[in-house]
Amino acid sequence: MQKTGIRINLNNNENLGVTYQTHIQNIGWEANTGRGWKSDGDMSGTYAQSLRLEAIQIKLTGTDTDKYDIYYQVHAENIGWMGWAKNGENAGTAGYSYRLEGIRIKLVPKGDPAPNDNVTYASPFKENIEASYSTIL
């Protein structure tokens, strides 16, 4: 059975966990569909549907969340590496049908600046909002 998803774990830390959700092609954000947030190694994504992941949100859980920030950066199809997002912010795209092609995740002490490798990136999140209308005669 083909899986299209991501599993995230924080290793060697008893006082921190991680929760996350993805924006899935033709489905949307998991939490908005009853699929809910995933945590500590659960798969976020789909089985046997070949639907691409388009965006992600990641948050820390546990008693030490006040001591750390979680930063994450995604590589999106047709865009490349996007800017760093943190602590539950959106990273990736929605409405463009661009797949996530890579991800970097870093845990840093609370209040430290975002990871910096002196490269300029696209914004952390792009949403294609379409309008629709109807006429009444």
Image (spheres, helix red, strand yellow):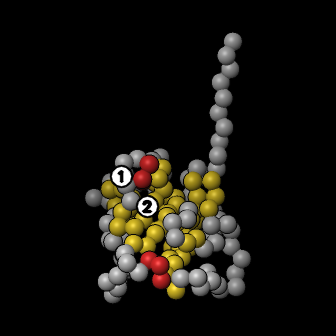
Q: Is the residue 15 above or below the residue 87 in the image?
A: below
Q: Quadrant of the N terminus?
A: bottom left
Residue contact between numbered discs 2 and 1, judged by CB atoms under 8 Å:
yes
Judged left or right of residue 42, residue 125 is: right
Instruction: State the residue position of label 2.
Output: 21
Q: Quadrant of the C terminus?
A: top right
Q: How many marks?
A: 2
Q: Work out which residue is located at the far left of the displayed protein and give it.
A: 1
Residue type at mark 2: give it.
Answer: Gln
Q: Residue at x 58, y 50 (%)?
A: 95
Identify the element where label 2 is drawn: strand
Where does the image place residue 62, in percent across and percent down from the top left?
Answer: 37, 75
Residue type at mark 1: give it.
Answer: Arg
Identify the element where label 1 is drawn: loop
Q: Work out which residue is located at the far top of the displayed protein and give it.
A: 137
Q: Is the residue 116 above or below the residue 30 in the image?
A: below
Q: Decide which of 112, 33 is in the foreground and name it.
A: 112
Q: Residue at x 50, y 77 (%)?
A: 70
Instruction: State the residue position of label 1.
Output: 35
Where does the image place residue 98, in percent across and percent down from the top left?
Answer: 57, 57
